[in-house]
Image (cartoon, rainbow, N blue to C red):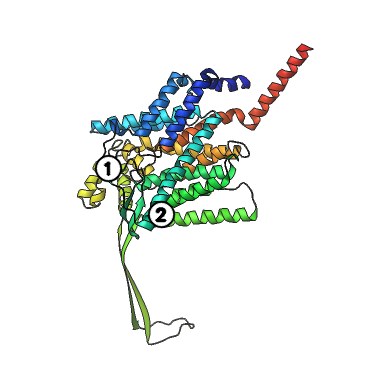
Amino acid sequence: MMLAEKQQVGRLDESLGPPHERSLTLWMLIYVASLSFTWFPHPDRPGFFVGLQMSDLVFLGLLGSFVVAGGMRWVRLKGWDYLVLAYIAGSLLSLFRVENPVAVEKQIVTSVYLALVYFTIGTLCVDEHRRSVAGRAIAGAAGILSLAGTVYVLAYLIFGLPPAPHALRDFVPYALPEPVPYLGQTMRLDLFFPTPELLGCYLTIGVAFALAFWMVGPPEFSAKYVALMLVLILVTEVFTFSHSWVGFACAATIACRQRGTGRLGLWIRRVLAAGTVALFIGVLFVSTFYIHDVEIDLRKVPAPDQPVDSHVLQKEEWPQITLSTTYGYLHYHVLKVLAWETFLGHPASGVGLGNFRPVSEAAYQEGRLSENCRRCEPHNTVLGQLAETGLLGGLPLLALWAWLFLDGWRLLRSSQGTESEWIARGCFAGLVGLFVNGLYTDVMNFRFLWVSMAVLRGLALSSQWTSAPRAQEATAQDASYAGAQASTTV
């Protein structure tokens, strides 16, 4: 029975034949690599129908090849697939509260599209070769993009290269001078992405797969080239000057985690973990408060009348320090508060998927937000989902992430010492990093998030046939069958 089930899962490639197999792999490679370009429409460029971008058009070719090859017949719901459907269904049901039909159309198309990406690539990545192709494409595209970013940074620092004109924004790397709290006017890279935060999130996935490949991947490429790619990714990530630093650090810490328990490895893990926690606390503070002015007043006052400790030198006058701080809340914090208040006001189904901007507009009219954020999103994955879809979409989202973490950790542990270990490590580290970045932005519409989930899905589906107990059972059945055949022949 086990062997029959294993053969049934692999029958997709057998029925497709070499031409279809190569075509699907090539389409998947092109699609994953094209995610390094913009997918959201820029205000100056309306994009294609409902904001579709180049990578989405590439996916149509992948989907068409998948359907023609009969791939839809091999899509089977397993594990967290039900939570994915529950998350999408709960989000779409909230659309009944939306008054803008254009927004409804866009949200429906986006949800269906993400589900197709997940199930199509998740089915293809049951094959180990395609999982490897997808993982290398993510790391390689991030490295090539970071090469452009690093060159731009060096040209800016050495030659004072100005930002690229908006008319060329789709064709050349892009940076913009922008005020950053505490840092002032700073050059921030966003390259082909709409914002530096989105570029940083993409690099979070890229560094996870690149580091995993460097640590435990197959020795097919020279380690020095992968190390160079990691340096380029790090430089580009630093110059995003975004909240994604925290998720980037989390992904890097998990991806480079050593299996050994030596003293040096233990201390390295502790230092990386402590640095990541310190970075998280620091970014949390600077994204909540903006300290505008600090005044220190030093004066002398009469000594207190009550007795003091004998170790204190008593004088007629004591020094007194008065510290006065002028601070305000940043819009990141205000938006999260608005999202929570919106959820409390509409706990069942929220205000409707994609319908938070009227809330921020009303907050602007009340003076709670500034002009540049009068139509902003909540900048938080969970709070934004709760505000727009209530418990109807919020609970499936939390359940989905919980399952991803549990199954991702299980696959990471069970794949140690196998060829799939770097894939499991890259997926798990990248998803954890994106979840952390989800504290500062909504990550659920990121195409590369769903691709990473799909690769992990493919690994999970394949691991049910290659886990130790089942593999031993299959081997025993093979041996029994071979013995029976031999006795029959004799």
Q: Residue at x 43, y 20 (%)?
A: 67
Label annotation for residue 167:
1
Query: Looking at the figure, which quarter contains the C terminus?
Result: top right
The secondary structure type at the circle numbered 1 is helix
* 377 vs 256, nearest the viewer: 256
Image location (x, y in percent) of residue 324:
31, 69
**Mark 1 Cα-neighbour bin, 10 Å: few <14, some 14–19, many ≥20:** few
Badge 2 vs badge 1, beta-carbon distance below 8 Å: no
| Precedes in sequence: disc 2 or disc 1 | 2
Residue 263 higher or lower than 323, as above or below: above
Q: Residue furthest left?
A: 365
Kindly identify the amino acid type of the residue bearing the numbered disc 1. Answer: Ala
Residue 399 higher or lower than 19, as above or below: below
Q: Residue at x 44, y 52 (%)?
A: 235
Image location (x, y in percent) of residue 282:
42, 57
**Mark 2 Cα-neighbour bin, 10 Å: few <14, some 14–19, many ≥20:** few
Mark 2 sits on what residue?
Answer: 154
> Would you say residue 81 is visible in this rendering?
no
Label annotation for residue 389:
none
Residue 470 horizontal side relative to residue 429, left or right: right
Q: Between marks 2 and 1, how big is the CA–CA gap?
A: 23 Å
Query: Looking at the figure, which quarter contains the N terminus?
Result: top right
The secondary structure type at the circle numbered 2 is helix
* 480 vs 486, nearest the viewer: 486
Kindly identify the amino acid type of the residue bearing the numbered disc 2. Answer: Leu
**Which corner quadrant of the image does residue 159 belong to?**
bottom left
> Would you say residue 161 is visible in this rendering?
yes
Residue 283 horizontal side relative to residue 164, left or right: right
